[in-house]
Image: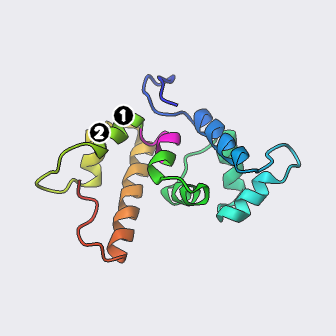
C-alpha cells in the first residue's frame, strides 16, 4: 500500500484504507454486496457502530484511535498494521520507530509525532490520542514505564 498520494507523501489515503478494509472483510467471509448483510454483521461482531463501518468502507471521515484499536482486535491484526492501512503512519515511519535505538529520556507523544513528520493536524491528533490510549492501558495493566522508546 506504500505509494505517493496526491498530498505527495507515502501515507495511505482514505480510499486506500476503504479498499484495504473491504479486502480484509471479504477475506473473512463478510458479504459486502448490497443486501449482503456483511457490514451489519461485522458491526455486530466488532462492536463498531454500523454507521462507522459504512463510513470507513466509503473512505469518509477520520477514525478515532479507539475505533482503529477495535478494528485491529476484530480482524486479529496488529494495531501497527491497521495504523499503516489507515494512513496514520507510513511503513517507513513505523519501521523508523521500531528500529531506533533506546533513548535516555522518554519521548512525549508530540515529540514522537515531530520525529515521525506527522504534521497534518488530524493525523497528529489521532497519533497523540492513540499513544495516550496505549500508555493508559499499559499503566492500568501495571506494566511499569510506558511507551518510552
Give the image location of residue 104, x and y in percent.
10, 54
Q: Residue at x 72, y 57 (%)?
A: 42
For label 2, the SS is: helix
Of residues 111 and 46, the one drawn nearer to the viewer in this rendering: 46
Give the image location of residue 110, x and y in percent.
28, 50
Q: What mark, if any, has residue 96 been given in the picture?
A: 2
Q: Residue at x 24, y 48 (%)?
A: 111
Q: Does the magenta-highlighted stretch encompass residue 20?
A: no
Q: Residue at x 70, y 64 (%)?
A: 45
For label 1, the SS is: helix
Q: What mark, if any, has residue 130 been given in the picture?
A: none
Q: Residues within 10 Å of mark 2 (few under 14, many from 20)?
A: few
- The Cα–Cα distance between marks 1 and 2, rounded to whole angstroms, is 6 Å
Q: Does the magenta-highlighted stretch encompass residue 86?
A: yes
Q: State left or right for residue 24 relative to residue 13.
A: right
- Compared to residue 10, the image places residue 60 above or below, namely below
Give the image location of residue 37, x and y in percent.
83, 54
Q: Which residues are magenta?
A: 83-89
Q: Residue furthest left?
A: 104
Q: Residues within 10 Å of mark 1 (few under 14, many from 20)?
A: some
Q: Residue furthest right?
A: 35
Residue 137 visible in the picture: yes
Q: Residue at x 79, y 45 (%)?
A: 32
Q: State left or right for residue 4 relative to residue 58.
A: left
Q: Which residue is mark 1?
A: 92
Whether tag 1 and tag 2 are in contact, CB under 8 A, the answer is: yes
Give the image location of residue 126, x and y in percent.
44, 50
Amino acid at each position: 500500500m506504500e505509494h505517493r498520494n496526491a498530498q505527495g507523501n507515502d501515507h495511505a489515503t482514505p480510499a486506500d484504507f476503504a479498499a484495504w478494509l473491504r479486502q480484509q472483510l471479504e477475506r473473512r467471509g463478510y458479504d459486502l454486496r448490497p443486501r449482503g448483510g456483511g457490514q451489519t454483521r461485522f458491526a455486530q461482531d466488532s462492536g463498531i457502530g454500523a454507521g462507522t463501518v459504512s463510513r470507513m468502507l466509503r473512505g469518509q471521515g477520520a477514525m478515532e484511535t479507539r475505533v482503529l484499536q477495535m478494528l485491529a482486535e476484530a480482524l486479529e491484526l496488529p494495531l501497527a498494521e491497521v495504523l499503516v492501512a489507515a494512513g496514520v503512519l507510513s511503513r517507513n515511519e513505523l519501521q523508523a520507530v521500531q528500529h531506533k535505538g533506546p533513548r535516555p529520556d522518554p519521548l512525549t507523544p508530540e515529540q514522537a509525532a515531530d520525529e515521525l513528520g506527522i504534521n497534518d493536524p488530524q493525523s497528529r491528533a489521532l497519533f497523540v490520542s492513540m499513544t495516550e490510549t496505549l500508555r493508559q492501558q499499559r499503566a492500568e495493566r501495571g506494566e511499569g514505564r510506558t511507551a518510552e522508546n
